[in-house]
Amino acid sequence: MLLIRSALFNLCFMLLTVVFSLLVILSRPFGFAAAWSWARAWSASIFALLRILCDIHITIEGKQHMPEHACVVMAKHQSAAETIAMPILLPPYAWILKRELFYIPFFGWALALMGAIGIRRGSPRAAIKQVMQDGKTRLTQNLWVVIFPEGTRAPVGSTGNYQPGGVIVAQKAQTGILPLAHNAGLLWPKRGFIKKPGTITFRFLPYISAETVSSMKRTELLQRLETDIEAETRKLGG
């Protein structure tokens, strides 16, 4: 039964992603807000499908830690689920992601039109420069900036190589950082076809103020973020 439900979900997921990507693309000329409303609707629709077909629910903790202004969000990366959830977890934002995603028909085109920052992994120095420039620009436009510091999905119970891009953006833009832990990989594993029933918990950790971000050494701040995010992820079973 899990196999059948997961197969049906995957089919609906692909169809809805194409449809909502088209809606984002077509509405973008009418303003960012119009396109963003469709991005949120896509996220909500996918999680409604997860609930109905796969018996996967979500809970959000730590919303009191969210600042009232745009900041950098550094999140654990285990699954596709946290990527899909972001539009319903956060105010309008721009992703920092690998540039290759822009080449995905419809979905990638929608990402590009929504101001995502696509970096070339093969050129670290150029990538860091682009992250600094474009990330700061997005923040001045009152868009939050979301980055997965591990760069790629890490299996449950493991830790990827945390990269300093998010810290660099926050320090250059003189803004704070909001860490995010979760256990999405338990129910929607990396490269996992079958979706397991249960509850995905997204937990925002205490906000790190712009003053603290500016005063700490880059390596120390990155280590603190890694320690806190990984510790909370383990507490959630991820």
Image (cartoon, grey):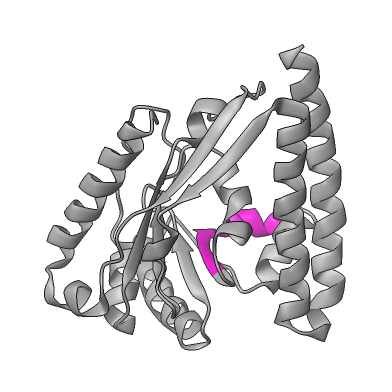
Task: Mark yes or no: residue 125 visible.
Answer: no
For the N terminus, give its image quadrant: top right
* Percent position of residue 235, x then y: 31, 33
Magenta-colored span: 94-103
For the C terminus, give its image quadrant: top left
Q: Is residue 26 above or below residue 12?
A: below
* Viewer-side residue, 8 vs 127: 8
* Percent position of residue 127, x then y: 41, 66
* Percent position of residue 173, x then y: 34, 83
Magenta-colored stretch includes residue 98: yes
Q: Is residue 47 above or below residue 27?
A: above
Residue positioned 84% across, 75% down in the render: 27
Q: Residue furthest bottom?
A: 140
Residue positioned 43% across, 29% down in the render: 155
Residue positioned 66% across, 23% down in the render: 193
Occupied quadrant, residue 147: bottom left
Q: Is residue 49 above or below residue 65?
A: above
Task: Mark yes or no: residue 31 visible.
Answer: yes
* Percent position of residue 10, x then y: 77, 32
Magenta-colored stretch includes residue 71: no
Occupied quadrant, residue 179: bottom left
Q: Is residue 72 above or below residue 14?
A: below
How many labels sit on residues?
A: 0
Q: Residue furthest front?
A: 64
Occupied quadrant, residue 102: bottom right
Residue positioned 55% across, 70% down in the render: 94
Horizontal arrangement in the rendering, residue 146 relative to residue 177 (left or right): right
